[in-house]
Image: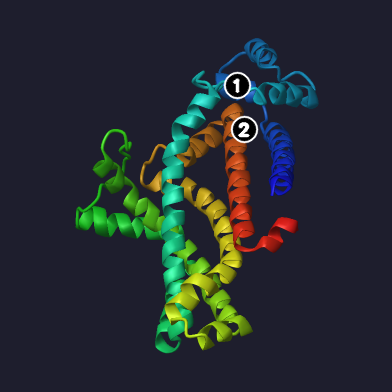
């Protein structure tokens, strides 16, 4: 198991390095006259040249990347070009906000997907058709449209939740719950649609296996067969899909945070990209890459726990 974890970590480090190089190259290649964008169109050529030299943008690209990488591995991601704030501070301050929403949406998706998938597989008929229809609708409707409808119905018309804003959990637990419920629902509906279908198919496949017929012949209850044995074998593919959905939820958070005016990484991503604040964008890219690597490692460990054969792969 230790070798399994080490291999995954090494592959994750390589992936992060490749992503950072590609992102750095593309950002600087498409950046245009970065110094003039920072100083404004009215800046003189002399001032622009001085700012370019100050930022080190007059050096070869590989030298710039080498300097950035040597600082990044020590935790120094530089400073924002527009407000001078440390990138590590900007990103870490918003990381907990985004993760609270994305992890919440992932948990809701996992629980409801298992319940709906098992229900559709066991009952069949109209229930199965109904679950598949709801899954299809949830998959087809864009997350931003769901978010707008939720705001209109539950915030504007009914007044149950705030339309915008975020309350830290350290300030008020009830306020935090009220501020994340609608974003979590908006993000999770599409994920539920996809994962529920995977769970349904995996459960139907697993229940046709010989070991299930043997367990039933031994007198085990149907709930015990399904929840103790079938789900253990059907969980691997569902976990893989859930990991992909988690990455998708990170991307969806960019739009949802804009709609609900939540000060998370998604909102920071939009602002930094619009301004062309490359150090902040790079910090966000690395943060997202690390999150994806960690999530995939956790999913691999969960699959290894469910299926010992994975540990040898």
In the image, is 41 to the left or to the right of 30?
left
For the residue pair 87 and 81, the one nearer the viewer reads as 87
For the residue pair 143 and 129, the one nearer the viewer reads as 129
Q: Taking 104 as reference, is 201 above or below it?
A: below
Asked if marks 1 and 2 touch (Cβ < 8 Å), the reply is yes
Q: Which residue is mark 2?
A: 282
Residue 94 image point, x, y percent: 45, 34
Residue drawn 37% across the image and 57% down it: 185
Q: Is residue 268 visible?
A: yes
Q: Is residue 41 visible?
A: no
For the residue pair 64 and 6, the one nearer the viewer reads as 6
Residue 178 image point, x, y percent: 27, 47
Residue drawn 53% across the image and 73% down it: 229
Local crowd size for mark 2, using a 10 Å CA cut-off: few (<14), some (14–19), many (≥20): many
Q: Taking 248 as reference, is 200 above or below it?
A: below
Q: Which residue is mark 1?
A: 78
Residue 28 image point, x, y percent: 70, 31
Q: Secondary structure at mark 1?
A: loop
Q: How is the image coloured?
A: rainbow
Residue drawn 54% across the image and 74% down it: 230
Measure how far apart labels 1 and 2 are at the Cα level. 10 Å
Q: Secondary structure at mark 2?
A: helix
For the residue pair 22 and 32, the one nearer the viewer reads as 22
Q: Which mark is residue 53?
A: none
**Hey, which residue is sitting farthest front in the picture?**
218
| Nearer-N-terminus badge (1/2) | 1
Quadrant for residue 261, please give it. Answer: top left
């Amino acid at each position: 198991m230790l070798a399994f974890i080490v291999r995954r970590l090494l592959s994750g480090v390589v992936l992060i390095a490749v992503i950072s190089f590609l992102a750095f190259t593309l950002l600087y290649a498409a950046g245009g006259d970065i110094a003039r964008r920072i100083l404004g169109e009215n800046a003189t050529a002399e001032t622009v040249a001085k700012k370019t030299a100050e930022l080190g943008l007059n050096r070869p690209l590989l030298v710039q990347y080498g300097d950035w990488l040597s600082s990044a591995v020590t935790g120094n991601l530089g400073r924002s070009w527009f407000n001078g704030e440390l990138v590590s501070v900007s990103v870490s301050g918003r990381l907990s906000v985004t993760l609270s929403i994305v992890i919440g949406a992932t948990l809701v998706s996992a629980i409801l997907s298992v319940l709906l998938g098992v229900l559709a597989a066991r009952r069949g008929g109209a229930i199965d058709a109904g679950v598949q229809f709801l899954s299809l609708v949830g998959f087809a409707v864009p997350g931003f449209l769901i978010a707008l409808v939720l705001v209109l119905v539950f915030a504007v018309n009914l007044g149950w939740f705030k339309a915008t804003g975020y309350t830290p959990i350290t300030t008020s637990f009830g306020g935090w719950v009220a501020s994340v419920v609608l974003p979590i629902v908006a993000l999770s509906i599409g994920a539920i649609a996809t994962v529920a279908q995977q769970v349904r198919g995996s459960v139907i496949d697993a229940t046709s296996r010989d070991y299930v017929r043997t367990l039933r012949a031994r007198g085990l209850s149907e709930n015990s067969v399904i929840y103790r044995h079938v789900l253990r074998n059907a969980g691997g593919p569902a976990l893989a899909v859930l990991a992909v959905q988690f990455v998708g939820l990170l991307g969806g958070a960019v739009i949802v945070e804009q709609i609900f005016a939540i000060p998370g990484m998604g909102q920071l991503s939009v602002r930094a990209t619009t301004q062309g604040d490359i150090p902040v964008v790079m910090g966000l890219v690395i943060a997202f890459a690390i999150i994806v690597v960690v999530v995939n490692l956790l999913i691999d460990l969960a699959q290894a726990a469910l299926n010992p054969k994975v540990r040898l792969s």
